[in-house]
Amino acid sequence: MTREAGGRPAAEAGCAPAGDGLRLERQLCFALYSATNLTTRLYRPLLEPLGLTYPQYLAMLALWEQAPRSVGELGEALGLDSGTLTPLLKRLEAGGLVTRTRDARDERRVLVGLTPAGTALRARATAIPETLRCGLPLPLEDAAALRDALWSYVQALRAEGAGETGLGSAGEAGSA
C-alpha cells in the first residue's frame, strides 16, 4: 500500500490520485512555482529604486530583523545554502549595504552585518509590504490565510525532512 509522508495510507489521507495526476494544473508544485514567479514580478518595480533584487531584499529583511548574523544563520533563516547565499552577499557588500567579517571567536564563521547605508535603506523599504498588500488581487483576509497555510506547509515539509531526503514513496501517491 502506498503511504504518505506522515505514515498514513495514501488513500486514507486523501492522497490517492484522481483522474490524470500528471496534468499540469493538478500539480501543487506548479501552482506554487507560478505564484512565486508572479509575486516576485510584483516586487520588481518596488525594489528597483532601492537597487535590490528580490533575493537581496529577503536577505536585507532578515538582517534588519537581526544583525550581525553568521552566514549559516542567515542561510537557515532564508532557506538557502551558503553556495547560493555567498554570491548574493558579495553583491550586497559591493553595493555598500553589508559587511562580511570573520568571527573573532571562531575564524571559520563569517558574520554579516549592516553598514550605515544598509541600515538607512530600511527606512526607504518600509512602504513595500503595504504597497504590495494593497495591490494584491485578493482580499487581505484571503492573502493572510494563504500566507498562514503556506507557512504551515513549510513547517510540515521541514518536519518531514523534505529537501533532505525527498518524499520517498509518498511522491507516488498523488500530484504535488
Image: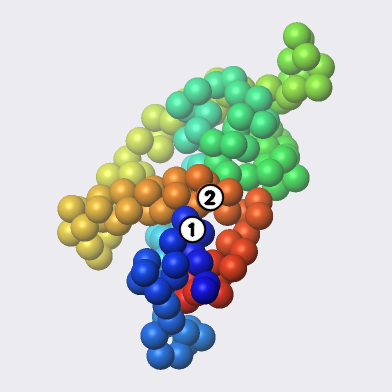
Q: Residue furthest front?
A: 1
Is 103 situated left or right of 134 in this image? right
Indicate whether 45 appears above or below 113.
Answer: below
Instruction: Name the element at disc 2.
Output: helix
**10 Å crowding of disc 1: few (<14), some (14-19), many (20+):** few
Is 135 situated left or right of 164 in this image? left
- In this rendered view, identify the residue nearer to me: 57 or 143: 143
Q: Disc 2 marks which residue?
A: 160
Indicate whether 60 appears above or below 169.
Answer: above
Image coords of residue 111 (percent x, y): 68, 22
Q: CA distance from mark 1 to mark 2?
A: 10 Å
Image coords of residue 91 (percent x, y): 69, 41
Identity of the residue drawn at 65% across and 51% down: 164
Image coords of residue 84 (percent x, y): 70, 47
The answer to whether any part of residue 163 appears in the image is yes
Identity of the residue drawn at 81% across and 17% down: 107
The answer to whether any part of residue 52 appears in the image is no
- Which numbered tag is attached to residue 66? none
Q: Nearer the viewer, mark 1 or mark 2?
A: 1
Is 165 situated left or right of 117 in this image? right
Residue kind at label 2, given as amino acid type: Glu
Identity of the residue drawn at 68% across and 44% down: 81
Indicate whether 132 appears above or below 3.
Answer: above
Q: Disc 1 marks which residue?
A: 7
Residue kind at label 1, given as amino acid type: Gly
Indicate whether 147 appears above or below 115.
Answer: below
Mark with earlier residue (1, 2): 1
Instruction: Name the element at disc 1.
Output: loop
Image coords of residue 122 (percent x, y): 44, 30
